Each structure stands twice: as structure tokens, then as C-alpha cells.
Image: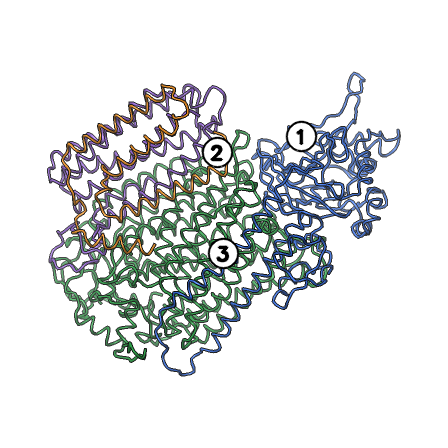
Amino acid sequence: MTIIERPSLTPVVAGSGVSVGVKPSQAYGSLRRPVSSTGWRSWVFTVDHKKLGIMYGAVAMFFFLVGGVEALLIRAQLAGPNGTVLSAGLYNEMFTMHATTMVFLFVMPMAAGFANYLVPLQIGARDVAFPRMNAFGFWCFLFGGIFLNTSWVLGGAADGGWFMYQPNANALFSPSHGIDFWGLGLQITGIASLTGALNLIVTILNMRAPGMKLMKMPIFTWMILVVQFLLVFAIPVITVALFLLMFQRAFGATFFDVGAGADPLLWQHLFWIFGHPEVYILVLPSFGIVSEVLPVFSRKPLFGYRFVVFSGAAIGFTGWGVWAHHMFASGLGPVSVAVFSMSTMLIAIPTGVKIVNWTLTLWGGKLWFTTAMMFAIGLIVEFTIGGLSGVTHAVAPSDTQQTDTYYIVAHFHYVIFGGAVLGIFSGFYYWWPKIFGKRLSEKIGKWNFWVTIIGMNLTFGPMHIIGLQGQPRRMMNWTEARAGEGFFNLGFWNRVSSSGAFILACGVGLFLINVIVTTRKAEKAPLDPWDARSLEWMTSSPPKEHNFDSIPVVHSLDEFFHRKYEENHETGELTKVATAEEVLADLEAHADAHIHMPSPSYWPIVLALALPIMGYGIIFSRILIVVGGLLVLLSMFAWTLEPSVADDTDYDPPGDPRADDGGPTKELATHV
Amino acid sequence: MSATTEHLERAGHDSDGHDYVEHHPDSFYVKIALALALLTGLEVTLTYVDIGALFLPLLLTLMVIKFFMVVLFFMHLKFDSKWFSFLFYTGLGLAVGVYLAFLATFRFFMSS
Amino acid sequence: MKRSKSNVPSLQLVQHSPRHRGWLFGAVGLAAAALSGCAKNAPQDTFDPAGSNAQKIQDLQVPVFVIAGVIGVIVLAAIGFVVIRYRDRGQEMPEQSHGKPSLEIALTILPALILAGVGTFTVKTIFELAKTDDTQCIINVTGQQWWWEYDYPAQDGCGGIKAPIVTSGQLVIPTGQNVLLRITSRDVIHSYWIPRLNGKRDAVPGRVQTLRLEADQPGIYAGQCTEFCGLSHANMKMEAVALYASDFETWKANQLEGYTAPVDGSAAKQGEAVFTANCSYCHQVNDLTTTNAAGEKVPVLANPDQYIVSGAAPNLSNLMTRNTFAGATWDLLTPACRDKVWKAVPEAFGALYLQGVTPECLNQVDLREWLRNAPAKKPMYSSDAQKANSGGKVRGMPNLGLKEDQIDLIIAYLLERN
Amino acid sequence: MSDLALQPTQASEDVHAAGHDDHGSHDDHGLVHATSTGLSNNKLGMWLFLGSECLLFGGLISTYMLYRGRHSANLGPDQIYDIPFTSVSSFVLLMSSLTMVLAVTSAQRRDERRMNLWLTITALLGATFVGGQVYEFTSFYHEGLGFTTSLFGSSFYTLTGFHGVHVTVGIIMLMALVGINKRGRIPGDRAEVVELVGLYWHFVDIIWILIFTLVYLIPS
């Protein structure tokens, strides 16, 4: 395996199979550059987009479980009338943190993980444009998430709902530090999103393989591009809102102090101007994933690629003009309500285009029902339900009956779980052999799929009924007096929903079991297990650190597929002309002689670590602000002066590379 | 968007890889700065002279002119790749559109 | 299920539909019909309008649900068909077609047309619901943690109100009249929602926002605060009571009736003293007087501003005319008596309701628990430790540490507040 | 935010791995590799960042516009602003944009002496502006307008404070550039680094153009 090239010394020819484990020299003592490519250092100081992608995924998965436990506690509380599992305060903290965790610490970073790992591979690049910034983003996410969750043991978590409406989130009404943790934690994870977005946009625009025009980019990359644009422009809006919140709570500013004449709707507008694009930030990556998976397992190209790209961009753009539909009941006045009602309906059109195109991709195909494919089809079905219930509350008068009831909870869980999460699972099954070199068990996978689907429909389906029967959200309990009788009584359906939640948890558990089982088995996946179509499959699995021995020249959409198959333009018949191994051998034969890879660095993690220190400082002690601030200055200064590729002096003098114990190949292969 | 980006891409490929394609003599920038100073002077003067209903539109026009003089010339956006314009103006346009709509929901433009 | 007579839903029909018309849905509409309120007596059913405003929403949302249902079934059927028809049976590799623009455009325009139709009716309904120029009765509604106050200003509307009426727990309105609620809040954002009478409207501090209600028939219509408003959000409920105009007159007259002091020597008389000593700091009872050190009779004026963050507590002058307490969360009536009122036929409802809470019907269990330790029954920020965080004021009723005999006396006193 | 603002000095971030680099050594810092658009990663990133910043300042300006009239009778914008003073400091900041441009053209001509000179002058002008702002804040405070006094106060200090922090970060970057440049240690393409700092600096200036008119000149 080829690792970072030692500049000017013993250049390693890519593809030669020579494995060089590099160790840092002792030149600067403990402050030497961490160029080590083995052991924990190779992960903590890495700037490799693939390692960062895996770490994003692993941490996001952990937070998924945290958020899931929170959800189970909520459903346990609501399983019967007058639930006593949680106290009122704890219940409020639970639903606040459930939403916050799932949105900011699971779906967004999981999508970031997929994007990090796959985008450079899909566009034929060797890394992202700003590798150290990429590492910095990951550590911001991790430390921000940990910071946010330490509030549980430092006086209580945030209890104002993830939407944190003012003035209920003021210090007067929420005196614990929970909301301070929430605001600062999201500010830190916001930095992760913003730097990640800047990085990925520049990467996608600038680092495509020769010949890869924008309209030849894989659809996943396209959707990620749209999402990153949404992030780049939406994050600053929440940043403003969070600063106002922090200045209010920590420094006594009056932004949401009604007594001083403030208008509480200011917060709502800022929050939803961010919050609505955020919805598309959550689902579009999964739309990208299934748009990759469906063609592969239908054995035909994505139907209407241009339309799917265009509708993705249109959803992203229109998403900026609909935020006030979260506020139809807040008293905007009929003109604003009418305008936002219409713009919201508009957004149903490009969304409908996507569903139509996916269905038509399947049409006439040769469908192979792998687990990845099943999750993808599951997404189409469940998301359609969520989309249609969405249309029912684009109709503003109807929405004033439904908003803040369980009907909305049902709607957005069909969108977020049925859309984003099913897509993420589809992506796991599809790309697992690429990332870890082993295929997840299809047998457990199918169980995983069916239990998850049944669980999700049992959990969220009844919420439609519960909501239309008038049960509001965010209530710590419900009572028999308002439950009604007969088939649609709230009691029965609340029980169904709670049971469904535990089935859903089993579904997720099956996935974890699958991961463990797969990790233990020795069998390697074939190079091209799915007969895939895009560039990320044109390298070894898992890919080498430099991704491609030689950067492929792209001639068409689905480049990999067209290298394997030749199409008779008259009859449309396909002939297999090459195997994946042959395509790969061809690339290796033309391997680039010299490849510079960016070197690891201390400074991203140090800089990211300084931020939560400052956060604790703002909440508990001003001294810590100074400590964190100095650490910020130090690490930025060091970062600035550090060249992106390490000097020779950072390395040990050249010796026998084979003397290294273990070596990086083993390390990468087993570290799942 | 697809049409735009394709167009942008061609524009990008046309450039020779150098970012500062066109050079202006320093005197050019001095002239721009002088104009900016004059416009600022005009703006300040306006606030001391009562010109009635024209005041606000005139002031805002001057502001916009100044804004774009810096963007187009000092920041070189006029002579640079269309990609930069695309990225910056998308942000600017979204900000202007979204925040004007935001203020409109508060009936901001009706009261003043 | 009341609404199961035949009629085909369509947007045209909606405009002129009589109120309680039923809908017979086709097979595809069944799901929507099922969702639309089959539950018997679900008091907050959003598909069971009982007045003109909710009916306008109903006329709009039923066709929308049907359209969404139809489209959903078509899409799901198409996916089902494709999945079965095109599964891999070892057929040839399919043709690598990249799409068909004409089909795409057609399938883009089609939903656009449907949505344009839906949008037209939506906008029309939005403006109809916002109409205020035919208001017949005005009530100020103020939300706070965690109950609603209703203030009927003096007006010619509502059949004429000479002096303001302040009440809470139950909003009493005359049937058939266009009632305009002017909604605001004293602390955080709440939301006023009586599903069978109209959609919801947020109570935003610093703003006054309007919501129209109209009830066709006498009865009690349940509702709930729907904007998350802190610890006891779940315990902030409301009930709207509609009365025939004549009954409404009786109710008004009763509310404006002066204070009847308890008979000397009665338990209620002792209760008056206990009330004055413990409750009257926050709770107003109109015209209640006490004797000061100089032996003069002086009015007892509640001063909740001093003790409560939101600066208000329910007026208890006529507590026993309303059937609920503590933010309409618990009933003042025993379950049996409550059932009688709630299930009364419209014609009999008024008389039953106006009886108020009689000693036999009083729900002693919940009321006593409440008086014993209010925050234990309804989570509130009112302990001493929590007071420190709110500028020394409580949010909600604190634990007054009353003894059992004091509670007996207070209940005896309150029973006469009718 | 201020953390991110320093990003442009990380000019060496351009990934070598992107292109087919046939150089044996790595002293080819900052050479524009064959990117898909033909543009530098750093510059593309900077413009994107500035686009993003538009929404940050847009939010702050809108908040100010919404709240500018909400204050006690004698402590509002019309009473408290000192237009002649602010006009002068606005002029100073405007002129710093000129000196910044001159620094960039000097850098592009590889005229390092002049470049350092213009960068220093730009930093000084910026410092003058920030000094003026500090003076202004202090005098407002003494007149009775604190951060927590009114909605106008909170939103005014937040908006102009954010701008001031941006200017300060810019000054730090300019001084760092001069300092590092004297030791010959700017990684990557020197002219591009100066240009990037310049873009940031001009952006801060155009935001002030908006603030000066919208906040100071328009009466509430």
C-alpha cells in the first residue's frame, strides 16, 4: 500500500504494491509532525478524507443510538395515560435532546460521513480541497456533540424543544444551563458543517477527474453539492440566531425580552429560515444515495438524470422561500400566510419529479433485490407517504388544525426516517464492501430491513391518527378524558406506536449485529460486488490512501459501467467487454509516478478542542475563555505556518520499510 | 441551474489558470477610491439637506453604487471568473431576498 | 359516525356545501375517511367541525386529503407493480435509456395543475377565515403558565355586557354568534386551539392576535394549548362552552352578580378568613372585604404581580360556575356529574351547565390533592429553590402547606362561589 | 466566526494530490494545479465564504432594522449618533480598501517592499477605524446606552461589534502577513495569499458601506 510520499526521497511508485509504514522522526521531540501512518495517531491526526468519513459515520452512529434511547423513553412515557416513566422536566429535556441529537448529531454528520468518504472517490480526486479543514470539521462535530451531551450531568439538558422558541428559552423560563450548552454546542457543530460545506463545494467544483463535466457527475455528488450550498448559506442564519440567544442568556441583551419591546417572532423567523433548508439538508443526501442504488440494482441508468439534478437544485432553491409555513398559526397575517402557503405547494413539484424518476428507473429494469435495493424502494414508499401528508399541511387552514399535533410528528418522521434514515441504511449496505472490503450479510440485512420497516410504520403510522384525533405534541402525558372511544381512540394507538418503537429498535439492533458478524468473518468481498456504475468502484476495496493509482479520464456518466459494457447503439444490446479487475489493472498499469498526499497535522484537533473549552468558559468560568482563546491563537498560528505536505525532517531516516511491524494495510483492514 | 453552470464551466476553462488576468494601473484604483470618497461625501451631505421624498431612494442608490464599485473593481469581480460571481451573488441574492421577505412579514415596510 | 351520507367530494361542491353534510368516500378515500374522525366522542377530533369556521377548514381539507390519498395509492400501486413485474427472472440486461423529457415535463405539469387548483381554494379560505368585520362578540384571551384567562370587555356585542367579566378555565360563548378572540400572552408563547370550532392561533406576548369562533350547537368543546410552553405544557387545557343566547344571558347575569358573604358562623365564613389569609394574595374574589386594624372594612385586592412571574392568577369569584380548575386540567365535577353535562342533548345542556358545581357533584378528590400540594399534582416552578431562578416569584401555584381542616374550610367557602 | 475568518492565510492548503504533479520536490507551493475550473481552491473557497457571510451580516442588519426604533425616548439613533465622526472613520476604512488594492498589485508585481508598506498602512487605517469604534462605543456608553439598555442598544452593539471583530481579525491577518513575509515564510503563492486577505478586507469594507448608510444615515 502506498502511503504519503516522502518528498524527494525514495519516491514510491503507486501500484507497485510496496508497503511503506512511515514513522515520524524525533527531530522536534514531541512537537514533530505526526506523520505516523500506524496506530491511534494515524486516526487522531489524520487528514485523510476516508478515515475522517469513517469516523464521522462511527460517531454519528453512536449518537443515533443515544437519540434512539431518548426516543424509546419518550414512547415508554406515552404508552399509557398519565405516564410516569419520566418527570415533566426530564420529558421536556428528552424530546429536546432527541430532536437535537437526531438532526445535528446523527443525520447531518452521517451524511457528512458519506460525502467525505465518497465524493472524492466519485469525482476521481485523491482527497478534498482542504484536508486539514476537513479534519478540523470532524473534531468540531465530535467535541460539539460531546459538549452538548455533557449538559445531562452538568445541571440538566436543554428543555425548550429543538426549535427553542423564545421567550420560553430565556433564562427566566429555563434557568438551568441546558440551553446555554445547546446554543454553544450547536455553534461548534455549526462550524463543522460550514467548514465541511466550503470544503466539499470547492472539492466538487475544482477537483473532478479530467472529462467529468458537471452533468457527468454521479448523482450522489450532485445532491451533496446542493446540500453543501444549502449549508453554506443556512448555517450563518442559525449562527446569528444562536448568538442572539447566547447574548441574551449570558450577557443580558434584550433581543427576546418582551418587556423591553422585543418581538418573539424574530427568533422563529431566524430559526426557520435556517430550519427549512435544514430539512432538505437532511433528506437530499439520502435522495442521492438511492439515486445511486436504484440504477445499479435495476441495471439501467437513472431515469431523467438531468431532471433529477434539476429538481434537486430546485428543491434546494425553493427551500429558501417556504420557512414561514412552520408559523402558520403564529399570527403572520393572511397575506404572508397565503404567500408562504403557495410557495410551499410549489416545492411539492420537484419532489414529485424525484419520485416519478425513481419509479421510472425501476420500470423495465432487471431488479435485483439486495438489502440496499430494498431500503431504497422502502424510501420511495415511505417518503411518498410523508410527502403527501406534507401537502396536506401546505394548505394553511388545514395546517392550523394539524400543526403541533402528532400528525406533524408522523409527517416528518416519514420524511426524516422514511427518507433520510432508510437512505442511509441503503448506503450502508451498498458501500460497505467498498469501505471495509467485506459485504454485510444479506440474510441479516433482509431481517434488518423488514423489522425496521414494520417497526417504523407501527411507530409513526398511528401518529397520523393520534394527531388528527387532536393529541398535541410535546406533552408529557395524555389523559383518558380526551382519548375518545372506539377504533380510533388515542389509548390504543399510543400503545401501538410505543410497541412499534421497540420493534424499530430491534431493527436497528439487527444492523449492529450484522456489522459485528461481518467484521468477524474473513471472507473478502469481490472487487465489484454489485456490478456498479460509478467511479468509486474503480479502485481497490478499501481504497488506497491516494484513492486512484492513476486518475481516470471520464467520458460519460456511469463511467465505470461503460468501461465494463459496450452498448450497441442500434439494438441497444449490452456486451460485457471487461471485468472490474481488468478495468482496475488498466488504471494500475498507468499509475502516476509521483503522488503527493497531504500530511497529518496536530492543529485541527487542537483548534477544535479549544472551542468547547471556551464554551465551558462562557458557562462556568471566564478563565477558561482565556485558556481556550489562547489555544485558538496558538493552533491557528501553527496551522498557518505548517505546510500541507510534511518536510523530510519530519520523517525517520529511510530504513528498511519492511522492518515496520504490522504496517498500515493491516491497520486499515481491521479497524472497522 | 444546469444551463448556468455549464456556461460557467466553459468560462472557467477559457481562463489560463491565472486568477489575475487583467492588470490595472494603480491610478485606476486611486480614481475609484476618489469616486467612493466623493459619493460618501454626497451621502453625508444629503442627510443635512432636506430633499423630501427623494432622500431615501437616493441614499440607497448611492449605497448600492458604492457597494458594487468595491465589489467589481477593488475585489476584481468584474474581471474575474464567473464562478466567483456565481458564488458571491448567490449568497448576496439569497440574503437580500430572504431578509427583505423576513422584514416584510413584520410589516416593516408599511410602518416606515 | 355522523357523516356517512352520500356525496362525492370535489372542490366545486365544497363551496356550497351545507354544514353537516356527510361524505361517502370511494375506496381510495377510505383511509382519509377513517382518519377523519370515526372515534366516538374524541373531544379534539380535527375532522368533526361544530361551527362555521371549522367547517370552512373541513370543506378544504377533506378534498385535499382525498386527493393526497388518491395520488398516494396510485404511486404505491405503480411501485408495487414495477417491483413485481420487473424483478430479476434472468431476463436480458435492460436497455440503457436515459429518460424521456416529454414524459418528465408532462409529469411535472400535472401536479402543478392539481396544486394550482388546491392553492386557489386555500387562498380563498385563508382570507375568509381572517375576516373580522362581522364580529358579534369580543373576548380577550390571555395565556400564561399554565392556564387561560377570559376577559369579556364591556361592549354592545355578546348581547350587551355592561361591566367586564373576568373568568378562566371555560370560555363561555353564545351559540350562532361570530365571536372574536383577541389573544395574547403574559409570559411565553402559547397557542389557543378548540379543534371543533377553528384552527389554532398562537398567543404571543407583546402581540394581540385574533381568532374567530362560532359554535352551532350548545355543548362543551375541548381544546388544548398547542405551543410548547414549559414544564406543564401538557396540563394547559381549555374548554369552550356554547350556550343558547337566553342561557348565555343567565350566565352573564350570574357572573356580574355581587359578592354573597357566607352566613356568620358557617364553615364557609371561617373558610373566608382562611382564604383571605392564604389565597387572596394572588386570587381575586370580587368585592371580598376584610376588617383592618382600625376596624374598617377594606376591599381585599389580589396582587399577583408581586408573587407570580406572569403576574396573574385565576379570578375565583365564580369558581363553581365553571366545571374545571387548574388550567382546565381537572374537573370540579365528579365523573358521573361530568358525564351528564358533557353528554347532554343540546336542548338540555344549558340548564345542566348553569347548575354549576353543587356540593353533591364536587370532585373532592382532585380538588383536595390540589390544595394539599399543587406542584405535586401539576409540575410547576414554584418551590423555593426554583423561585430563586425567577426573581423570587413563582410560576404556578406553590405548595401553601395548608392543614386538612383549613382545606375543609376553604372548600366550604369555595362551594359558595357560584 | 472569527476563527473561520482566518482561514485565508492557510494558503498552502491546496492539495497537491489533486493534479498530476510531476515535480520531484515540493517547493512548488501554490502553483495553480490543473483544477476543473482552472481556478485556485483557496480563492474559490474565499468567495464562497464571503457569500456565506452575506447571510450572517444580513441577519444582523435585519435584526437591527427591526429593533432600531425600540428604545427609551432620549437614547435612540437620532439622538446618539455622531454623524461627522462616523463619516470620518468610514472614510478611513474606505481608504484602507485602496491601500489594500495597492498591496495586492504590488504583490502581483513581486514588489515586496511596497507590498509590506501598503499592508502596514492598511492595518494602521483599520486600527484607526477600530479605535474610532472603541471611542464611539465608550462615548455612547457614557451617554447611557449600554448593551442591555434597550433593543436598539443590544442590536446596535451586536451588529457593529460583529463588524468590528471582523476588522480586528483582518488587522491580525495583515500584520501576520507582514511579519511572516519578512521572514520569507508565507507558504504557497504569496500574491494569492495577499489577494485572499484583500478580498476579506474589502468585504468587511462593503459591509461597512451598508452599515454606514442603513444604520447611521437613515433616520429611524
* Residue assigned mark 1: C304
Q: Do the residues indicated by labels 3 and 2 lie within the same chain of the protein?
A: no
Q: CA distance from mark 2 to mark 1?
A: 36 Å
Rendered-image quadrant of the C terminus of chain A:
bottom left
Residue beneath label 3, please? A67
Q: Position of residue A438 (x, y in %)?
A: 35, 72
Q: Quadrant of residue D212?
A: top left
Position of residue B94 relative to residue C268, above or below, is below
Colour displayed for chain C in the image of the structure:
blue
Furthest-top residue in this view:
C294
Q: Nearer the viewer, mark 3 or mark 2?
A: 2
Q: Is A264 positioned to the left or the right of C374 in the image? A: left
Which of the numbered marks, if any, corresponds to residue D167? none
Judged from the image, the secondary structure of the residue bearing numbered disc 2 is helix
Q: Residue furthest bottom?
A: C90
Q: Residues within 10 Å of mark 3 (few under 14, many from 20)?
A: many
Q: Colour of chain D?
A: purple
CA gap, disc 1 to disc 3?
41 Å
Chain letter for the part of the structure drawn in orange: B
**Residue A140: x and y, percent?**
36, 49
The picture's colour for chain A is green
Looking at the rendering, which quadrant does residue A621 occupy?
A: top left
What's the residue type where badge 2 is placed?
Answer: Phe
Please check whether the numbered discs 2 and 1 fall on a single chain: no
Q: Which quarter of the rendering shows the N terminus of chain A?
A: bottom left
**Contact flag, marks 2 and 1 (Cβ < 8 Å):** no
**Pointer 1: residues within 10 angstroms few (<14), some, or many (20+)?**
many
Between C246 and C207, which is closer to the camera in this rendering? C246
Residue marked by disc 2:
B108
Task: Name which residue type carries label 3.
Answer: Gly
